[in-house]
Amino acid sequence: MDLKNTDDKVIDIAFRYGYETPESFTKAFSRFHNVTPSQVRDGATARTFLPLTVKLQVQGGDKMNCKITKMFQFKVIGFQKEFDNDTAYQEIPKFWDEICEKYASNVYAGNAPANPYEKAIVENCIGEYGVCIDDIGEGKFRYLVAGKYTGGEVPEGMVVYEFPKGDWAVFDCIGPIPEALQSVNTQIFKEWLPGNPDYELCGNASAEWYDCVNGEKTDEDYHSAIWIPVKKKN
């Protein structure tokens, strides 16, 4: 990246990264990238890595694929509960089970909605998103079992949250839930965001997306994703 984005001399870059001579730097660089530093400066492609601690091991998910995409503003509606950062990975799956058993079992069985909560679940596809909102402090955050809000009645106890228009980092995840998704989430916030030279977190909320059409959440090839609002660093 220094070769591509700066006018620094190759010898200065070599010294910066611990090489005693430009020759030793060029030799090591060429062996790894299959091109010379000068060729990269002229436009050749080299292998690039974010400046992370090199520990790309995701337990439960096969790999972490990320793309930056623009999204229009949108609203979600859902059932809300507060969680502690330290116990969230254990407690949030229980919250999902609680909501499904209390509010969704009838409509998930194919029956017509029998109350405003079941009507909201059907009309807004509640269960497609999980939304984390970090606006409480003291090691706590709000979490919504949610769907995209389509308008209409908001039953008592449910909440609506709006995401603004902006750039999002979208991380695909393949594997059974919740283990695969939690592993990718940990890597995002411990490695990808702290080490990313181009993007930083924007706002205080993020979203989990769940495929509600294909497969079961316990399948080895189940598809989910984590959406993180981001902005370009200055």
Image (cartoon, rainbow, N blue to C red):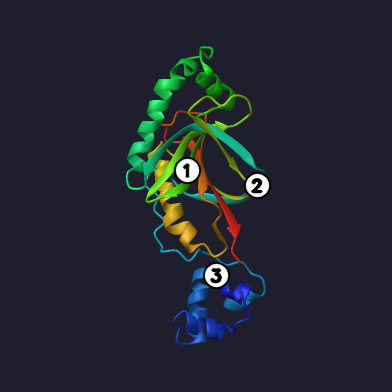
- Which residue is rendered at x = 58% and y = 77% of the image? 37
Q: Secondary structure at mark 2?
A: loop
In the rendered image, the quadrant that contains the C terminus is: bottom right
Q: Amino acid at mark 1?
A: Cys
Mark 2 neighbour class, 10 Å CA radius: few under 14, some 14 to 19, many 20 or more: few
Q: Is residue 209 above or below residue 27?
A: above
Q: Amino acid at mark 3?
A: Asn
Side of 85 where 171 appears, left or right:
right
- Gap in Å between the C-alphas at discs 2 and 1? 17 Å
Mark number displayed over residue 165: 2
Mark 1 neighbour class, 10 Å CA radius: few under 14, some 14 to 19, many 20 or more: some
- Gap in Å between the C-alphas at discs 3 and 2? 41 Å
Q: Position of residue 202 (x, y in %)?
A: 56, 54
- Which residue is rendered at x = 53% and y = 19% of the image? 116
Q: Nearer the viewer, mark 3 or mark 2?
A: 2
Q: Which residue position is annotated with label 3?
A: 34
Q: Which residue position is annotated with label 1?
A: 132
